Amino acid sequence: MLSIADTAAQAVEQIEDGSTVMIGGFGVAGQPVELIDALIEQGANDLTVVNNNAGNGDVGLAKLIQLGRVKKIICSFPRQSDSWHFDEKYHAGEIELEVVPQGNLAERIRAAGAGIGAFFTPTGYGTPLAEGKEVRELDGRHQILEYPIVADYALTKAHTADTAGNLTYRKTARNFGPIMAAAARTSIVQVSELVERGQMDPETVVTPGIYVDTVVRIQAPKTPDAG
């Protein structure tokens, strides 16, 4: 049954120490800023985080890493000019890193939601990322075996939800949101608009409510929906 939280803090209060948490977003587009901030305040520790990158600047995921609350990060893009908190923790041996090519990351998440046990892909073959993985030659190409990534929780952002949990997104803010919502045992979503059941055009629904557990409306998000 869908839970509609009054605040972001209420939405994330169930997240336990040691959880695997997927966090949506591609840069600021679709990033659930208020849910991340609420998780920082909530205090859950020893987390494994699945995200496209390893945080930016001193806020959001970067702040969570700075506070030492992330034991492992699974991402495709761990380093950039403002990823100094991840860099510091990684070089100090205080955070574990699993680098996954971006397409493989998306497909491993999608596979979890689709109930796929594993899949073969040529991406990463012949590189250090393939070390220790099963290799087969399929249709004349060497491919490596990859497994789904399943999370305890997903924190994502959509534009609109109805009271049945159906979601729509705004343009590029869609990115990882739909597949992460399906891949997590508990999906927590912040939205800009919340409407009654029946007010949403079924043809526009991207994430069906069956994949959504908690919705919270953020009326004035710090980062507006991206175009």
Image (cartoon, helix red, strand yellow):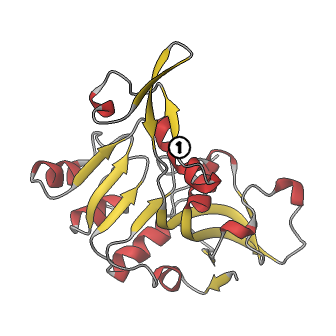
Instruction: Say which of 138 and 17 sits in front.
Output: 138
Q: Residue at x 72, y 59 (%)?
A: 207
Q: Dividing the picture into quarters, in which one does residue 7 lie?
A: bottom right
Instruction: Say which of 54 and 141 sits in front.
Output: 141
Residue 117 image offset from top left, x and y in percent: 54, 49
Quarter occupied by the N terminus: bottom right
Q: Residue at x 31, y 46 (%)?
A: 98
Q: Is residue 4 above or below residue 162?
A: below
Q: Is residue 208 left or right of residue 29?
A: right
Q: Which residue is mark 1?
A: 106
Q: Is residue 164 above or below residue 140?
A: below
Q: Amino acid at mark 1?
A: Ala
Residue 83 image offset from top left, x and y in percent: 27, 47
Q: Residue at x 64, y 68 (%)?
A: 191
Instruction: Say which of 209 and 111 sits in front.
Output: 111
Can residue 60 be seen in the rendering of this structure? yes
Q: Dividing the picture into quarters, in which one does residue 39 lie?
A: bottom left
Can residue 55 be seen in the rendering of this structure? no
Q: Is residue 77 above or below residue 219?
A: above
Q: Residue furthest left?
A: 92
